[in-house]
Image (spheres, rainbow, N blue to C red):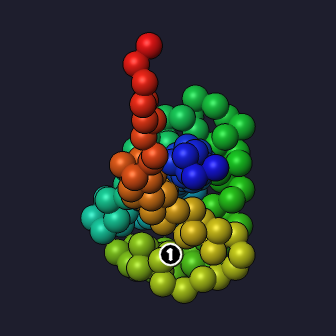
């Protein structure tokens, strides 16, 4: 089992990353606040900007993913929409400061899950047990 920890961490990274690009890729499609969130992400949150840049074409190409992203983002961020419309420059601060509901908590956990799992995968990859061959054939 210890020899496969890096594989498990890599799978968890892939799950987090795919979730992030699908969900954050739907940000520009949010009516009235999507552009504000995307602009704020480009200024303040390079990881979110990357997820948006990679995920937007994916969500546009596969409409069911775009619908899923819209539903998750609306459920997670809806409590902050009014404040984001009032002051668009603080969109990322609002999104990452207070937790509004369980969906918002999950979005934030997965946001940070991808970079953390990438780091864990890298560490486990370099520390994985190496095969030792005692006798040559």
Residue 61 place in picture, x, y as percent: 58, 29
User: Which residue is found at the position 42% from the left and 31% from the top?
Assistant: 134
Task: Give how far across and how far down residue 98 sits, in percent.
Answer: 54, 86
Q: Secondary structure at mark 1?
A: helix
Residue 74 locus on image (x, y percent): 67, 63
Toward the bottom, the furthest residue is: 98
The one nearer the camera, 6 or 101, is 6
Looking at the image, the residue that sits furthest to the top is 137
Q: Would you say residue 21 is visible in this rendering? A: no
Q: Is residue 10 left or right of residue 47?
A: right
Q: Residue at x 54, y 35 (%)?
A: 58
Closest to the observer: 127 or 36? 127
Relative to 63, is 125 on the left or the right?
A: left
- Can the viewer see residue 56? yes
Depth check: give the residue in front, 29 or 96: 96
Residue 99 vs residue 89: left or right? right
The residue lying at 44 percent from left, 48 percent from top is: 128
Q: Is residue 69 above or below residue 44?
A: above
Picture mark count:
1
Q: Position of residue 50 (x, y in %)?
A: 37, 50
Which residue: 65% across, 68% down? Answer: 106
Mark 1 surroundings: few (<14), some (14-19) or many (≥20) residues within 10 A: many
Furthest toward the front, the residue is 135
Residue identifier under label 1: 95
Asked if 125 appears above or below 74 in the picture, the reply is above
| Quadrant (top left/top right/bottom left/bottom right) for the C terminus | top left
Above or below, 61 against 73 in this view is above
């Amino acid at each position: 089992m210890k020899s496969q920890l890096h594989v498990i961490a890599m799978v968890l990274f892939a799950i987090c990353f795919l979730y992030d690009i699908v969900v954050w890729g739907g940000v520009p499609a949010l009516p009235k606040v999507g552009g504000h969130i995307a602009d704020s992400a480009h200024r303040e949150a390079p990881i979110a900007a990357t997820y948006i840049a990679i995920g937007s074409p994916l969500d546009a190409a596969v409409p069911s993913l775009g619908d899923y992203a819209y539903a998750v983002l609306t459920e997670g961020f809806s409590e902050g929409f009014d404040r984001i419309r009032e002051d668009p420059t603080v969109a990322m601060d609002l999104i990452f400061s207070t937790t509004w509901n369980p969906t918002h908590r999950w979005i934030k956990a997965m946001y940070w899950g991808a970079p953390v799992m990438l780091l864990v995968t890298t560490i486990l990859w370099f520390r994985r047990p190496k095969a030792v061959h005692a006798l040559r054939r």
